[in-house]
Amino acid sequence: MQCLILAAGYATRLYPLTENFPKPLLKVREKTILDWLLDDLDATGLVDSYAVISNHKFAPHFLAWAENHRLPITVIDDGTDSNETRLGAVRDLQFAIEQLHCDDDLLVIAGDNLLDFSLGQFLRYAQQKGTSCTMRYWENDRNRLTKSGISEIGADERLLSLEEKPAQPKSNWCTPPFYYYTKADAAKIPDAIADGCGTDAPGSLVAWMCRHSVLYSMEMPGSRFDIGNLASYEQAQTNYKGITR
C-alpha cells in the first residue's frame, strides 16, 4: 500500500504563519503535523511507501524535511506557485500517481489534519471490506455541514453518495480527508477527471467513485483537529494530546 499525502495548498487562512512555510510542517507540541500522521502509519506496518504532493513554492521545505527523516519519503512538486494556479487535490493526485508510476492500493490523506486515534483501525477496516473506503463522523452544526463533504450511508455502512459543501445537507455524516482506494479504483482517476469530476476538493473524487464502484464508510472511533485557520491551530496546540485510542 502506498500513502499519498495532499500538501499542495497555500493555506492563506493561516497567514502570516504559512505565507512562506507549508502548513503540514507546522509543529503541534513537539512534532510537525505530518510527523504525527506518519509516525502512526509507520507503527501499523501496513504502509510500504510515502509520497508528499507539494506545490513549487513549498517543495524545498518538504525536501529538506524528508532528507533528514527516518522514513523514505518522496516529495513531488506539482509545478504551481500560487493559490490561483493550483491544480486542485484530484489533479494533484493524478499527477503524483503518474510521476510515481503507482500501481498499488492507495491511502490518500490530507497533510493538515490530526487524529486522536490510529489510522490502523481504518486500514484494517478497508482491508476487511476489500473495497475503497472513507471515514465519517456525526456533525450537528448546520453551518459546518454546509462547508464539508456530506455522505449518505446505507444500513450496511455502504457509502451511497457524497456531496461537497451542499446548501441542503442530506445527512449529518461528514467525511474527513482520509481515503482508501483499491488499486482498481485508483486506476479510474483519469476517467473521473475526463468525465467532469470536480478537481479542487478531494471528496469530489469520492462522489464520482460512488457512482462507479462500491465503497464503505467507517465511523470514526475518535476525533480530529482540522487545522484551517489561526484559531484552529491554537486550539490544536492547546488540546491535542496525541493518539489516545
Image (cartoon, rainbow, N blue to C red):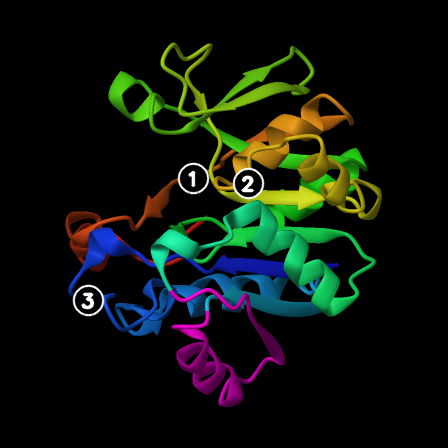
Residue 78 spot, x, y in % from top left: 54, 65
Which amino acid is tagged 1? Gly
**Mark drawn on residue 199:** 2
Q: Is residue 204 left or right of residue 96?
A: left
Q: How far apart are marks 2 and 1 (CA)?
A: 29 Å
Q: Element at badge 3?
A: loop
Q: How far apart are marks 2 and 3 (CA)?
A: 26 Å
Q: Label 2: few (<14), some or many (≥20) within 10 Å? A: some
Q: Residue 159's image quarter? A: top right
Residue of label 3: 17
Based on the picture, tell me whether residue 136 belongs to the magenta stretch. no
Mark 2 and 3 residues: CB-CB less than 8 Å, in contact? no
Furthest-bottom residue in view?
68
Residue of label 1: 222
Which amino acid is tagged 2? Thr
- In this rendering, the label closer to the viewer, 2 or 3: 2
Residue 53 spot, x, y in % from top left: 54, 64
Based on the picture, tell me whether residue 71 belongs to the magenta stretch. yes
- Over which residues does the magenta segment extend? 56-81
From the viewer's side, name the closer residue of 102 and 140: 102
Q: Is residue 92 above or below residue 170?
A: below
